[in-house]
Amino acid sequence: MKRILMILAPNDYQDNEYGIPREAFENAGCEVTVASMGVEVAKGVLGGTVEVDGDISSVVIDDYDAVILVGGGGAKVYFDDVTVHQLLKDAYSRGKVVGAICISPSTLANSGLLEGRKATAFPSEGTNLVEHGAQFTGEEVTVDGNIVTASGPRAAGIFAQEILKLLGES
């Protein structure tokens, strides 16, 4: 069974960018763990809530096959978070699948992981991705190696399927 870590903002994560992929992952037989920062319950921008399994500061990256950053306005909290940047770099260096949707690809870009890679994001983040060395595709979903990026809630289902393909679960 593949294990997937989904990182949510404590407040204002995008409910569909969390719920649609999580359902797809669980339907494929994956185990999903939710991490956030400083909260036991994360609150979505559309009114949903999610019980958090653990704080990002206590994540052991070797426990997971994939790390996924969920978007939504609150995801800005991770743009320059050194703990999350190190988790992402560790996951990538160990060959794990790394995914980010909506504005969250900016966290990948700011960590240095998108330099020289194709990536997409919510249009507002395109300039930031380019400034950090990415080739911004503007597509709904872009896969480059073991990194999957997506543009927003409409792409959540395709995003999840691409992650599952890389995990060998589709």
Image: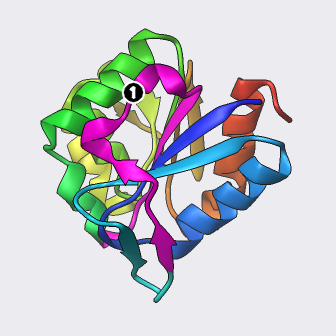
The furthest residue to the top? 94
Rendered image quadrant of residue 129: top left
- Residue 133's place in the image compared with 32, above or below, is above
Q: Which residue is mark 1?
A: 60
- Res 150 seen here: yes
Residue closer to the observer: 96 or 152? 96
Work out which quarter of the rendered image holds the C terminus and state it.
Answer: top right
Residue found 32% across the figure and 62% down from its top: 9
Rendered image quadrant of residue 74: bottom left
Residue found 63% across the figure and 59% down from its top: 156
How far across and down, in percent of the image, does residue 92 sit? 43, 18
Residue found 38% across the figure and 71% down from its top: 42
Work out which quarter of the rendered image holds the N terminus and state it.
Answer: top right
How many C-alpha atoms fall within 10 Å of the one at disc 1: few (<14), some, or many (≥20)? few
Residue closer to the observer: 57 or 80? 57
- Res 133 seen here: no
Q: Amino acid at mark 1?
A: Val
- Residue 122's place in the image compared with 148, above or below, is below
User: Quick check: 54 left or right of 65?
Assistant: left
Rendered image quadrant of residue 120: top left
Magenta stretch encompasses residue 71: yes
- Residue 36's place in the image compared with 96, above or below, is below
Residue range corresponding to the magenta coloring? 49-73
Residue found 66% across the figure and 57% down from its top: 22
